[in-house]
Image (tube, rainbow, N blue to C red):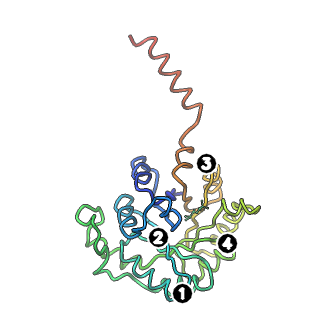
Amino acid sequence: MQIFLDTAKIEEIREAVELGVISGVTTNPSLMMRAGRGDYKAVAQEICYLVQGPVSAEVTSTEAEEMVEQAKAIAQWSPHVVVKIPVTAEGLRAIHALSKLTPDPDNICQGCPWRGKCQTDPDVAHDLALTWGIRTNATLVFSANQALLAALAGASYVSPFVGRLDDAGNDGMQVVADIVDIFAAYGFETQVIAASIRHPMHIVQAALLGADIATVPYAVLMKAIKHPLTDVGIERFLADWAKVSK
Ligand code: E4P
């Protein structure tokens, strides 16, 4: 299972990249607000430069035609960008339309300030745009039916919101389990992102269930690194070594 970081904060992403444990990033308008940033394109392009993996950026329209127009613009930011679309009837219509579209490869990474320094050079970006097309992440998924419908419509990823389901008295991980089973039974290529992760055991549970990805807030990732016995063990080794190493 891969881990994505669920944040729009550049410092958190830089640190997690240095740890070598994240393969992508998910953002949404609330995470942009928490990062204090309204310049979505600049933030997404910097994240793509840092992560060199899938970076989800969300549309803000609720109407299919407008979602498609926003998604087409977002998809030009970088071949690494994945467009997040909420699962509604309008959202499914947009996902389906976008599954047949490709970004304009000659204008990919337009205005990106990281051009020239980025590992994804312009020729590679051009080819990736053609190969990957416009990828979508069906977001705000709260049932296996919504995930199935998003996959049928052509979504590249589906994001069941585990924590918010748990908050509402449902079993979020059971929804992830059902989606993983359904996609495996019918050979869907759509990847399952366990989202709205609230604590380290959610990561373990998602991995055991066979989710392709868990998207994890920075604070949860830091908690997952730590174990009190590791700290005690280090202290003891250092104390013992100090006794004999003089
Ligand atoms: C997923 O892509 C979402 O950004 C995120 O996981 C939502 O989580 P929350 O319920 O903590 O807002």
Q: Position of residue 218 (x, y in %)?
A: 51, 51
Q: Identify the amino acid type marked 4.
A: Ile
Q: First in sequence: mark 4 or mark 2?
A: 2
Q: Residue at 39%, 68% (x, y): give it.
A: 39
Residue with the mark numbered 4: 182
The mark lying in front, picked from 1 and 4, is: 1
Residue with the mark numbered 1: 64
Residues marked 3 and 1 touching at CB (< 8 Å) = no
Q: Position of residue 156 (x, y in %)?
A: 52, 74
Tell me: residue 98, above or below residue 77. Answer: below
Q: First in sequence: mark 3 or mark 4?
A: 4
Q: Residue at 22%, 64% (x, y): give it.
A: 116
Task: Determine whether the residue tagged by mark 2 lies in a helix, strand or loop.
Answer: strand
**Quadrant position of the N terminus in the picture:** bottom right
Q: Identify the amino acid type marked 2.
A: Ala
The mark lying in front, picked from 4 and 2, is: 2
Q: Residues within 10 Å of mark 2 (few under 14, many from 20)?
A: many
Residue with the mark numbered 3: 200
Residue with the mark numbered 2: 57
Using the numbered discs, state the Cα–Cα distance from disc 1 to disc 4 in whole angstroms. Answer: 27 Å
